[in-house]
Amino acid sequence: MAEKILIIDDDLDTLRLVGLMLQRQGYQISAATNGEQGLTKALEERPDLILLDVMMPDMDGYEVTRRLRKNPATVSTPILMFTAKTQLDDKVTGFEVGADDYLTKPTHPTELQAHVKALLARAVPKDTEITTATLEQHGFVIGVLGPRGGLGVSSIAANLAASLFTRSQADVILAELTPGQGTLGLDLGAPNQKSLTEILQGSPVEVTREKVQASLSPHSSGLKLLLASENPREVALTSKVNNYEVLVTRLAALARFVVLDLGVGLPLFVQKILPMCHERIVVLEGAPNTIQQSKFLIDEISAMGINRKGIIAVLNNRVRSEAQMPWGQVQDRLGHSISITLTPAPELFLQAARMQTPAVVCQPTNITSQQFLKIADLILEREKAR
């Protein structure tokens, strides 16, 4: 099969002339007229070589190269920078951002052909095993959310993920999707996480399978983690709804189970993700106001067209208090069945925080740990039934 060369240049005459010249040499040619389009084509088509103009109006060649080199899918794709500029500093900048070679316009066809052949000869061979969307596995995705903060959503997501790993011994991803509000990194001994931020900052096409896979961090519990940062300024990234949609699709192709910490309420990105989930877990406590808020949340999720049978309510009694209602009363007020009630175990969670691991790993025989395992068993049953 002919090697594919992507030419990115806003000069249409250059695109036509260079493209025709290389076509005559037997190469397959793809073209883009600006940096954004070129970045998209590079990540979607995976060319064998990129000819890249430096001076473009929307996104110059340096920025295109930086972004290509940050993505594992294109980190080793040869890039030949093509420009009218001759200054040494410009060439140095090109090499610093990751270009492999540099040619100055206009160039002689023989010189261009020689550089192209040399770069293709030195290129790292592509992986011959190409995984297409139809061949990718589709993991079971569970979204965990609450009507307000302080209900233990992140803790339940982490312990559910650990319980699923204990029960299945399969790949389980725990993804905290709340940039700027991350807590699991601190809890699990992996603070200052940047992977989710980098995934959300780019364009959706940059959220490749390779980039997402490279963003996952292994944990001693057996889980693979994608964690949110603690920097409050990054909460604005929740507006990148399209990136979230692609991200969840990629995660589902990388593990048998994917547990998503969706945080609080129904922001736009959560509304986009919930229909992609196989199960949704709503966390609440036995206090009147929280029960009412949870009822509103479940009703709104149902109004999105999601079957109420696909919504699991978990009553999380975090403190020992006479003020907590028994699960029967909570269920009546909620108007939705309570699948699991978690027993208060502050000492267990304190010990787990010190050990930087989920509570079910810290003390697997604890009654609360066993309750988490029951949630995992319920998920496993529903996975088999799908």
Image (cartoon, rainbow, N blue to C red):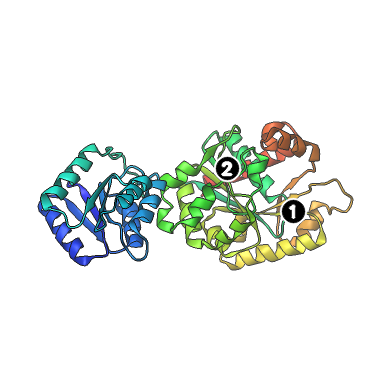
Give the left or right position of residue 131, taking residue 23 as reference.
right
For marks 2 and 1 on the same chain, the one whose residue lies earlier in the sequence? 1
Q: Secondary structure at mark 1?
A: loop
Most extreme residue toward the bottom is 303
Q: Quadrant of residue 335?
A: bottom right
Residue 331 appears in the picture as rendered: yes
Q: Quadrant of the N terminus?
A: top left
Q: Which mark is residue 150?
A: 1
Q: Mark 2 belongs to which amino acid?
A: Leu
Q: Residues within 10 Å of mark 1 (few under 14, many from 20)?
A: few
Q: Secondary structure at mark 2?
A: helix
In this view, the residue in front, 200 or 166, is 200
Indicate the position of residue 56 as horizontal and vertical percent values: 32, 63
Give the left or right position of residue 96, taking residue 339 as reference.
left
Give the left or right position of residue 265, taking residue 305 as reference.
right
Indicate the position of residue 30 as horizontal and vertical percent values: 23, 57
Q: Nearer the viewer, mark 2 or mark 1?
A: 1
Q: Which residue is rendered at x = 33% and y = 47% of the image?
A: 92
* In the image, residue 354 above or below residue 259: above
Q: Which residue is rendered at x = 26% and y = 39% of the image?
A: 123
Most extreme residue toward the right is 322
Indicate the position of residue 356 as horizontal and vertical percent values: 67, 35
